[in-house]
Image (cartoon, rainbow, N blue to C red):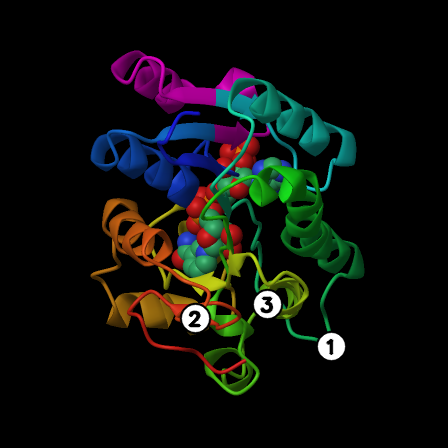
Amino acid sequence: MNPSTIYLVSGSNRGLGLGLVTHILANRPAAFVYAGVRSPEKMSALTELSGKYPGRLEVVKLVSADVEGNQAVANIIEARHGRVDTVIANAGIGTTLATVSEVNIASLEDHFHVNVAGTIVLFQAMYGLLKKSAVPRFVPISNAGAGLGGKGITRPLGNVLYGATKAALNWATRKIHFENDWLVTFPVSPGPMDTDMYRNIISTDTIGFFKKWAEANPDIPSVETVSGSLLSIIDESTREKEGGQFVHIDGTRLPW
Ligand SMILES: NC(=O)c1ccc[n+]([C@@H]2O[C@H](COP(=O)([O-])OP(=O)(O)OC[C@H]3O[C@@H](n4cnc5c(N)ncnc54)[C@H](OP(=O)(O)O)[C@@H]3O)[C@@H](O)[C@H]2O)c1
């Protein structure tokens, strides 16, 4: 059996997912990465990485909450490696800001579908392959704004679409932790970073809360910086240290 770490990163076409794949390939020379993307025809940066790191990257079509498609990816990984070691459930959406009184319910359901159901479907599909790993890890990317006692709810203009679904994601991940004593799993908050999602939320912020916040915090971390810090946490995580905790990128624990 190949002793190197086998990773699967969802949503790796751009943003944090692409940053994580890039960082793994550059800094974990023995690692193999399955890069999940929903539209393989759009993956120009991953094509470049494929050329740069031959034999270490396979791009797979992975659409959030598509049960058959997620199982098909599991079948591909089973055939090539027989196991997966680290699954990073990164694909997610966070669109416009909305108050609870005005939130569009179809949009809320879309966010639940991708951020919550998508992560659970991925876990179900990867369950058997994770069980075959000596050091299995399942790490969903959450958000500090999901915390009920912390930043999310105390911000009067916090994003209900995003916060409520990431809170549900946190709940499911903690439940996975208690149900599977062989697994390292925890939601991790990357903090704000300069991606399309971040820029889109700022540019569509008609109320001005995040625009003001962004102006006051111009040194938003790059995807490269965040990817390196997150991978240090993920790769060194244990069930005892991080398992079932809501972990922030600075290593602290966030309130649920
Ligand atoms: N940016 C921030 O400040 C911030 C802060 C806290 C947490 N996060 C979390 O970090 C993660 C990555 O966010 P990001 O900032 O990198 O976002 P992004 O730039 O918008 O990228 C999102 C990624 O998710 C994929 N995706 C979206 N919907 C999908 C679906 N239905 N099926 C499969 N893939 C889908 C996208 O694929 P396409 O390219 O095909 O659209 C893209 O690759 C998310 O979970 C987000 O909630 C971000």
- Against 155, residue 20 (above or below) is above
Q: Is mark 2 within 8 Å of ligand 1?
A: no
Q: Bounds of the magenta span?
A: 35-58
The residue that mark 1 highlights is 101
Query: Between tags 3 and 1, which lies in front?
Result: 3
Quarter of the view holding residue 209: bottom left
Which quadrant, please, contains the N terminus?
top left
Q: Amino acid at mark 1?
A: Ser
Residue extending farthest to the front is 1
Image location (x, y in percent) of residue 181:
59, 63
User: Which residue does the image show at 72% across and 51% down from the upper left?
Assistant: 117
Q: Depth check: 215 or 222 in front?
A: 222
Query: Between tags 2 and 3, which lies in front?
Result: 2
- Residue 56 in the magenta stretch? The answer is yes
- Residue 194 in the magenta stretch? The answer is no
Q: Depth check: 83 or 172 in front?
A: 83
Q: Amino acid at mark 3?
A: Asn
The tag earlier along the polypeptide, 1 or 2, is: 1
The residue that mark 2 highlights is 240
Q: Amino acid at mark 2?
A: Glu
Label 1 vs label 2: CA separation?
41 Å
Q: Residues within 10 Å of mark 2 (few under 14, many from 20)?
A: few
Image location (x, y in percent) of residue 250:
28, 69
Q: Residues within 10 Å of mark 3 (few under 14, many from 20)?
A: many
Q: Secondary structure at mark 1?
A: loop
The tag earlier along the polypeptide, 2 or 3, is: 3
Let me know if residue 203 appears in the view.
no
The residue that mark 3 highlights is 170
